[in-house]
Image: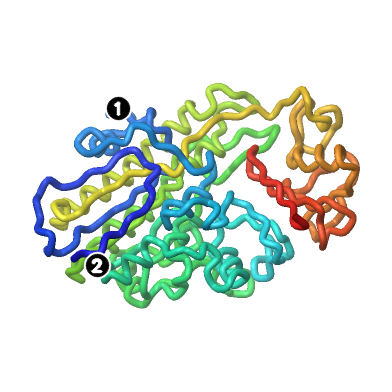
Amino acid sequence: MRRTISFISFGFLALSSAVAFAQNSQPRNLILFVPDGLRALKVTPELAPAMAAVRDKGVNFKNPHSLFPTFTMANASGMSTGHYLGDTGTFSNSIYTGHPVQSVPSQLGTVVPFIEHDQILGEVDKDFNGDYLNEETLLKAARDAGFSTAAIGKVGPTFLFDHTERTGTKTITLDDQTGAVEKDGKLIGIPLSDEMKAALTAANLPLATPGRGDNGKAGDAKTAGTTVANIRQQEYLADVASKVVLPMFKARNKPFVLVFWSRDPDGTQHNQGDSLNSVTPGINGPSSLAAIRNADNNLAQLRKALDDLGLSATTNIIVSADHGFSTISKESKTSPTVKNSYPDTPEGFLPLGFLALDLAKALDLPLFDPNDGNKQVGPNAYPKAGNALLGKDPNKPDLVVATNGGSDLIYLPKG
């Protein structure tokens, strides 16, 4: 009997070939395509023809929902394991671990790391007995069952699908940090196997993922963010998948599972510069729509590769967004912080870390910044990443705030 690999899908559409196959035949291939932050109702034949075709010709799940709107790592933990957040512990993109970061200079010393980072995930695994999720992941189950496996795309959720495999030889992992190094020469991303290095070179593709360029510009309170989609980086990742990994898997002549996690439209929606300090047009502006097209083009490229390689009839495709998206206001009529002035914060707007500031005032507790050496935050200032340790001793806080873009987490370490 074939082993069945199952997981919770929060997506909205799937396509399976109509070719019948016997129970004892070779297992089918699977591509899980994740357009991060995509709203299902934005998929139309005009804007996203490839995704619309999969939906209309396949199975459409009309009532999807995320485990935790709208956080990538929380939902990625569910998609990669089939377990709820109480099992995986990944309640958001920044979490309180209780262990100071030791290996990543940009987050050194913090106990509230941003975990969309390959080295941070490695540290958290070490802190929790080698596997902080403590659940079997999709790609590990697949490779244990004899499948070829690969995870390609946005750093963080991509690696989560086989996060204990850090050699690059059992599962191919390729994300934003592939080929990147620290100032001391230490490799940041998961290493490429010799087989992958040779295949990338033969395909005239670099061994390091290009950056986001202008798409990575988030802007600030005075400067608009990006007006372009994440095209260059995702073209490279789609080329790796279609020109290197899929041909490699075909040559191996065994079933495969490929996860392709598209940063767009989420990345562009976060950084879009179409509506500075305004909720309109927000994520319905031209930059965000271009990001949906960008993700759709990536899916179309993968489908064409399957056709060209003769793999379409034996490959199932699942398109599953991790969450949707919304445009939020940064104004408030109740927060005491709006009565004060803060650096880089327009008058009447909430400062970064406003929840921690409000709680510190209400509870009359000192506030310390875990992302700035546990320094105490003074008047008319805010914690640099929004995270905070509240209490008289930052090493033994009464309360911890992990800032996550409007849906913050509050931890009570002392119970």
- The residue where tag 2 is placed is 248
Residue depicted at 22% across the width and 58% down the height: 29
Residue depicted at 65% across the width and 37% down the height: 406
214 lies left or right of 199: right
Mark 1, secondary structure of its residue? loop
Say how many tags the image has. Answer: 2
- The residue where tag 1 is placed is 46
2 lies left or right of 46: left
Mark 2, secondary structure of its residue? helix
Image quarter of the N terminus: bottom left
| Quarter residue 145 falls in | bottom left
Q: Please say whether residue 97 is visible from this viewpoint.
A: yes
Crowd class of label 1 (few under 14; some 14 to 19; many from 20; radius 10 Å)? few
Amino acid found under the numbered disc labelled 2: Met
Q: Please say whether residue 371 is visible from this viewpoint.
A: no
Colour theme: rainbow
Residue depicted at 37% across the width and 46% down the height: 9
101 lies left or right of 266: right
Residue depicted at 51% across the width and 57% down the height: 156
Amino acid found under the numbered disc labelled 1: Glu
Residue 180 at x, y percent in the picture: 52, 66
Residue 147 at x, y percent in the picture: 27, 67
Crowd class of label 2 (few under 14; some 14 to 19; many from 20; radius 10 Å)? some
Q: CA distance from mark 2 to mark 1?
A: 33 Å
Q: Are marks 2 and 1 in contact (CB under 8 Å)?
A: no
Residue 161 at x, y percent in the picture: 42, 60
